[in-house]
Amino acid sequence: MLAERTVELTYDLAKEQGLLHLDLYGETLIACFDCQLKHRAKAGHSLLNFLDTHKGHDLYVLHPVALRQQSSLGSLAQSFADNADVKTAWGTSSAVTCSLASKADNTARESTAVDNSTNKYLDALVYLAIALQAGSPANEKAVYVWVYGSEDGTNYTDNATGSDANVTLRSPHNFKLIGVINCPDSGALTYKSHPMSVALAFGGVMPRKWGIVVENQTGVTFNATEGNHTKSYSGVYATVA
Ligand SMILES: [Zn+2]
């Protein structure tokens, strides 16, 4: 039995009425009896999205009063699973092993490979903070951040080995650029990168293993204390909520 203030909702009706009146209902529930899903309605985008998704389905708007009255329809709707939204989530910021202390100008260092085969992250955002020694940046005044990958977990891009080690960049080499940290000013400054996407370098898909290659083209040697450099990443995954 339909409670007094429960209204059947069609997509056209919702559009016709605008959806703003739903604000007045506070905890209004939209229930789809075809999909057996419920959606806590706050007027606006998410509701429109729900209506779009359930176009032509058997939809009801359940006013809080109707829900309190324990109507059979209300009770049934309450038992439905919540409509799910897929959202972005981030894993804990973790260290990338890549020794950068006293790295000279015009040299490069590769990191230890990060194994993604367990976490299976959809992306990884890499962050670097590079401290320069005193001196005036020259030439390209930049730190280039490249990425290497492994399809089979054994073979790595170009001459990368998967270990924290110096690497001699071939000319041209085959690493993929994921970021440039411009370092224009002298004063032993620490230059911070933006969050750099690893997946972007591989067509949007994460390889089984990956690592970074940091190339110093600042004209200045990196700070001698390893702890003055930050090398980290956060895994990115989708969560259903
Ligand atoms: Zn539906």
Image: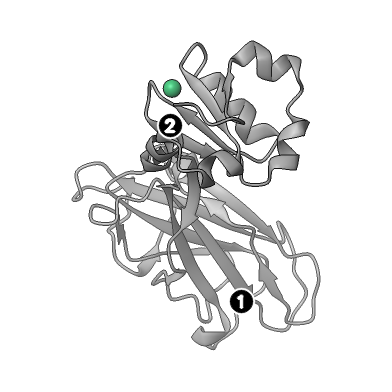
* 237 relative position to 215: left or right: left
What amino acid type should be assigned to the residue bearing mark 2?
A: Leu
Q: Gap between marks 2 and 1, in whole Å?
A: 71 Å
What amino acid type should be assigned to the residue bearing mark 1?
A: Thr
Is label 1 in a helix, a strand or a loop? loop
- Residue 115 position by quadrant: bottom left
Which numbered tag is attached to residue 73?
Answer: 2
Label 1 beta carbon within 8 A of ligand 1: no
- Which residue is located at x 40 percent, y 34 percent? 72
Name the image quarter holding the N terminus.
Answer: top left
Q: Nearer the viewer, residue 161 or 50?
A: 50
Q: Nearer the viewer, residue 241 or 152?
A: 241
- Which residue is located at x 66 percent, y 67 percent? 192
Is label 2 in a helix, a strand or a loop? helix
- Which residue is located at x 66 percent, y 73 percent? 220
User: Which circle, 2 or 1, is nearer the viewer?
Assistant: 2
